[in-house]
Amino acid sequence: MASPRFSHMPWIQLGHVDPAATLTPPPSAFPEDSSAGQRASMRFAVSGNAVFTGGAGMLALTSARALLEHGLSGIALLDLPAALQKAIAAIASLRTDFPAATVLAEPCDVSDAKSMEGVAQNARDQLGDLTILCCFAGMVYCGSAEDTPIDDWRRVLDVNTTGAWIAAQAVGRHMIASNRGGRIVFISSISAHRVNFPQPQAAYNVSKAAILNIRSSLAAEWTRHGIRVNSISPGYMDTVLNEGDQLEPWRRIWADRNPMRRMGSPQELTGPVVFLCSDIGGSYVNGADLVVDGFLTDEPVDDGSVQFTGETVDEVIVG
C-alpha cells in the first residue's frame, strides 16, 4: 500500500517569530551578597502597575492590598460607580497605608469595550506602563435553567466572559506596546470544573468554564510578548455577600462538603494572587489554573429543603 501523502496539508501561519527576540528569559540570579531575608523578599516581590476589574469587591480589595504590600507601585481599581461608592473607605485606607503608591478608582463597565479602552488608557497615562491585570469582575444568576430569561443569561456572560476578554484585550495591547511583558490573572471558579449542584446557575458555570479557555489561548499567543496568563479558581469564599440568615443553610451545606469544614477567607486568595503576579516566584508559571477550594467534595448530598429563586447578584457569591 502506498504511503499517505502529506505534502498538501494546510498550515496555519501564526506570523514570524524570532526566538532570540521573543522568548521570555529567566529572571536574573539573586545578588551574591544578598541575605536570606533579602532573597525571601525578592522571591515574591511584585513590581509595576496593576489594573483590577471588579476592583471594589472584597476579594479584589484584599488582593490589591497584598500586592501593594509586596511592592506594587500603582493600581487602578475599576468597578461600577455604585460599587466604588460603597468601597470608598476601603480604597481610602489603601491610599493612607501606601502613600508611596498611586491608587486610582475608576468607574467602568467591563462589558463596554470603549469604556474599558478609555479607562485602560487613562490608567496608562497616570500610572505608567501597565504590567499586571487581575480580572475579578463577576456576577451570578441563580435560577432554574428552564426559567432563566435570555437577558439574564446574556448579562452573566457579558460580564464574566466577554468582560474578562475585553479587559485582557485592552490592557494586553498596552503590555505588548510597552515591550516589557506582563502578568494576567483571571478569576475563574470551581464552577468551571464542576456543576455546583444544587444551586441552579447554568449561566455562571458556563461563563467561568469559558474563562479557562481564554486563559489557555492567551497564554499560548502572548508568551512571545513576555506576558504570562494564568487563572485562579476559588471555592466558596466568606465575603459579605455570603452573610445573612437567608444563606445560613447554604453556608452549612458548603462547609459540610469540604474536608476543612469551612469556607475560604478572602485573605487565603492573596497567596496565589501574589505568586502569579510576582516577578520571580511565578516567572515560569504560564497557562495554569490554581484551584483554591479546600478540596471541595460532592457529598453529603443536599436534601432539597433549600430552594433558590431567580436572583441576580453583581458580585460572585459562590465559587
Image (cartoon, rainbow, N blue to C red):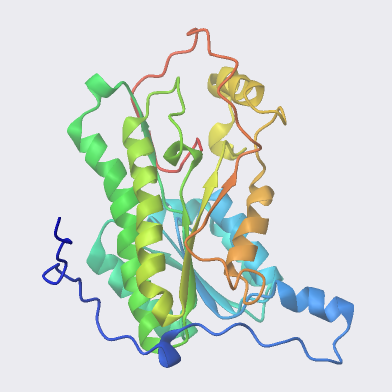
Name the residue: 41% across, 47% down: 138
Please tell me in which quadrant of the rendered image residue 299 appears: top right
Residue sitting at the far left: 8
Please tell me in which quadrant of the rendered image residue 311 appears: top left
- Relative image position of residue 247 (x, y in whole percent): 55, 23
- Relative image position of residue 306 (x, y in whole percent): 49, 12
Name the residue: 14% across, 60% down: 2
Question: Is there any visible trace of residue 93 in the rendered image?
Answer: no
Q: Is residue 219 above or below residue 26?
A: above
- Relative image position of residue 152 (x, y in whole percent): 25, 35
Q: Is residue 158 left or right of residue 198?
A: left
Q: Is residue 260 above or below residue 289?
A: above
Name the residue: 83% across, 91% down: 32
Question: Is there any visible trace of residue 128 in the rendered image?
Answer: yes
Residue sitting at the far front: 1
Q: How many marks?
A: 0
Q: Is residue 252 left or right of residue 127?
A: right
Name the residue: 34% across, 43% down: 207
18 or 217: which is nearer to us? Answer: 18
25 or 111: which is nearer to us? Answer: 25
Please tell me in which quadrant of the rendered image residue 227 appears: bottom left
- Relative image position of residue 172 (x, y in whole percent): 37, 74
Q: Is residue 315 above or below residue 135?
A: above
| Placement of the N terminus among the 4 image quadrants | bottom left
Q: Is residue 48 above or below residue 296?
A: below
